[in-house]
Image: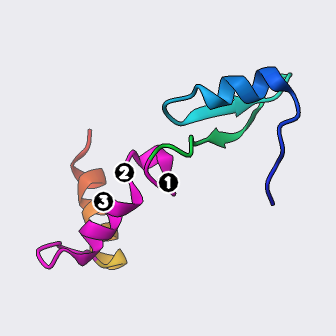
Amino acid sequence: MPITILDESTAAALATASSPQEVRGPDGALLGQFIPASLPKVSFPEFGVTDEELERQLKDPNSRWHTPEEVMARLREIDRCSP
């Protein structure tokens, strides 16, 4: 459900954003992230990769995928070798 910004100064601040921005409440608590509409679609901004790039990687026939078991085995190996 869309949230309408009624405060003009807040709307103006968001309109000038050129990259994803944290949105915080008056108490400083993180409310979420704002992604400007002018940016390419980014479902997971914390990864810093556009949806188009994720789609390209998914379709890449040379991509190497790992099973959860392979990942856990590698993590155990790293843990065992760490001081």
Reading the image, the residue beneath label 2 is 49
Q: Is residue 55 magenta?
A: yes
Where is residue 55, by image quadrant?
bottom left
Q: Earlier in the sequence, mark 2 or mark 1?
A: 1
- Residue found at x 88% / y 34%: 6
Does 77 sit above or below residue 27? below
Mark seen at residue 44: 1
Q: Label 2 to label 1, Cα distance in Å? A: 7 Å
- Left or right for 22, reference 70: right
Write down the region rendered in magenta.
40-66
Q: Is residue 41 left or right of residue 71?
A: right
Q: CA distance from mark 3 to mark 2?
A: 6 Å
As shown in the figure, which amino acid type bears the numbered disc 1? Phe
Task: In the rendered view, tell whether residue 54 sits above or below residue 5.
Answer: below
Question: Within 10 angstroms of label 3, few (less than 14), some, or many (20 or more) residues?
Answer: few
User: Hey, which residue is sitting farthest left in the picture?
Assistant: 62
Q: Is residue 28 visible?
A: no
Find residue 19 and report its horizontal and vertical position in percent.
49, 33
- The N terminus appears in which quarter of the rendering? bottom right
Whether residues under marks 3 and 2 lie with C-beta atoms below 8 angstroms apart, the answer is yes
Q: Secondary structure at mark 1?
A: loop
Which three-letter amino acid code belongs to the residue tagged 3? Glu
Foreground pick, 42 / 31: 42
Q: For mark 3, what is the residue? A: 53
User: Hey, what amino acid is under mark 2?
Assistant: Val
Query: Which numbered mark, 3 or 1, is in the foreground of this view?
Result: 3
